Image: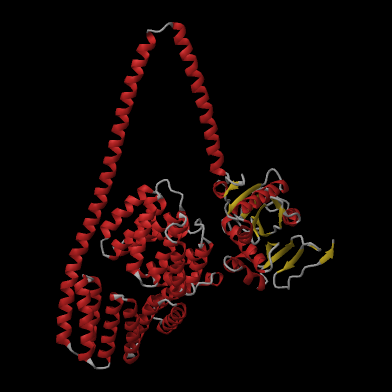
Amino acid sequence: MSEIEAIHDLSDRDNTAALQQLKAYKEKIGANADYGLRAELLKTLITILYDAGKNKEANATNAELMQLARANKDADMIALALIGDAFQLLDQGKFALALVKLGDIQQSLRDSKNFEVLMRLNIAFAAVHLAIGNFDKSLAYSLEALRLTDHIPNRQAQARLYRMEAISRLYLNMHNAEKALETATDALAITPKVDSPKTVSSLTMARGLALTDLGRYAEALDAYKTVLQIATEAGMPVVAATALGNISDYYLRVHQYDEAEQAARKALQKAQEIGDPFAVAMAKANIGFGLAGQRKFAQGITYINESKKYFMETGSRSDMESLLSEIGSMYETAGMHKEALAVVREQQKLSDELFRSDRARAVATLQEQFNAQQRQKQIELLGRENQLKDAEIKNRQLQQIILMLAAVVMVMIGIVIFFLYQRVRKTNEKLREVNQQLEFHAVRDPLTGLYNRRSFVDLMKSRIILPEGERREGSLENPDCLILMDIDHFKNINDSYGHAAGDVVLMEVAQRLRSTVRDTDMVLRWGGEEFLIYSPRSNPAQLKNLVERILRIIGEDSVDVDGIPIAVTMTAGFISLPFSGIPEMVCNWEKALQIADMALYLGKVNGRNRAYGVSKLLIAYEDALPVLDHDLSAAIKAGMVELIEVHGPVKVHAGNVVETVAGAQCHIERQDK
């Protein structure tokens, strides 16, 4: 699994090399490998094949995944392959059938906890609704997919960036270029944390499209050139072809027709290499318009007619209508009014047909949705009818038993009733035990027994947020405290000693954390190797002592696993709530936890086995929060916050707590133990 994940990470930088390695690895493991390994390999291969423009091969691999999942009765993986089938229907323009299929998949996943499958289902729904023009629904599904990226087990950052890129393109379709640009720019600010040229190229392309819509053509051209360079270096011909097409569009907009022709010819070559007929048609259209702009109408019309022929043969009438609009503008600019009028009439006729077709398609989609709902209701009614029949049969059997018992001596009846009572009592006791276990697992992590993320979120939902200007009694003198922690190099522990050893380390860390805090404090497993301590009404003066005690109790003594000592340290970020006297209406627990997370990340960057606490603001929160929301390092450099640094234990020296004011050089005093 780690090899597949490493190859997937490589695809973010070099898609061609990653594809070669993954295919070689597939041959290496063969058809008799572990099911989970083969399924993960096929799932990853599908994604990389699509990025390489090999759609037919990707669809064949999706069919292979479906066959494997069904043979192993893996409901979640079957659903994932069915979602792939729905995307194929979308590519074929069968939007109604795609919606029906996705609705059936959604029904089958009602009880699923596989966040990756649920995320992809929402992505598919968003894509279909975007295709049929239901932008509001598409945005709702896109935002839900973005939320689910926080819960998937692998590649969270990459998935989040791709969702933001999709939302940016959706805003473009909604003619909200400003929001599209803002979303793409915000996502690009996160990309330094992820070594992924593929993600950067997608976001930069979305940003270029938004800049084009805003008329900022020079900036858009810079964006497209950046994408072309990344795509060329990372072996992504599909992205390169798209970038060249957009560069050609730019030159057409600014009437640099020779440059437009050259860029379009390069786009045509790329499109032909990857075998993408749609990209070929678009490139030929741009070559034609570039030639026409140079007064080479005969040559230009030849290319444009080839593009028209493709759109007519494939039934891509919306693209055909856009092409006719551009042809009409070309004739009008050239003063060829007769030809322009003929094209306008052709476009008007096609627009009328599109309107009727879209209306019929919308009606068909609604009819399919209605039929699917009716089928589901019919299934439910049949199920209830069967339940009633079963109940009647059981009642008749019970009546027969009662009649037979009536003939038995009263003493025997008493004995039977006694035993039945005992059995029911034991069943009820077992039921109570099961309910207690279910209640426990609803709020507890099954491995460590700590509270889980859901229990903390539920607690925070019940937290009363007072209006600005009002304070809880003692909230400033004794604020709540959030300490977010992450085990250092936990992946190395799993890789070196095995996942069973990793589980022992997690359980031991959980036990040590519980023994360190107060009974009123809440210790929870935040996810993976991350833990969170929620300490209500804590003493700010003792907070750094608590953090130092936590680092010491975790790092001083190694964890013994079958006689093998494993050194374990943690890195943490901590903050008080309310933070620095800011009303919680402005800086709620989620924002505070986000700041603590950035402090944790700062600790990772600066060597691990340490903690950083954001103590207080040194300037007005109205000026500090816009920076602190997304970049703690920038806030420190600008002297906006006061920082507390705590070092964990080391073998020879022990770190003292040092409070530093942001903007000054952090220093660490050390003394011999």
- The x and y percentages for residue 365 are 25, 56
- The x and y percentages for residue 331 are 21, 86
420 lies above or below 646: above
User: What color scheme is it?
Assistant: secondary structure
Q: Residue at x 47, y 7 (%)?
A: 411
Relative to 80, is 369 on the left or the right? left
Residues 496 and 29: in front is 29
Q: In this view of the protein, can residue 97 be seen by the observer?
A: yes
- The x and y percentages for residue 263 are 35, 86
Q: How many marks?
A: 0
For this orientation, the residue located farthest to the right is 672
Q: Quadrant of residue 143?
A: bottom left
Q: Residue at x 26, y 44 (%)?
A: 375
Q: In this view of the protein, can residue 252 be seen by the observer?
A: no
Relative to 455, is 232 on the left or the right? left
Residues 654 and 651: in front is 651
17 lies above or below 402: below
Relative to 267, is 94 on the left or the right? left
- The x and y percentages for residue 188 are 50, 72
For this orientation, the residue located farthest to the bottom is 295
Query: In which quadrant will I find the C terminus?
Result: bottom right
Relative to 230, is 582 on the left or the right? right
Residues 507 and 228: in front is 507
Q: Residue at x 39, y 56 (%)?
A: 80
Residues 157 and 81: in front is 81
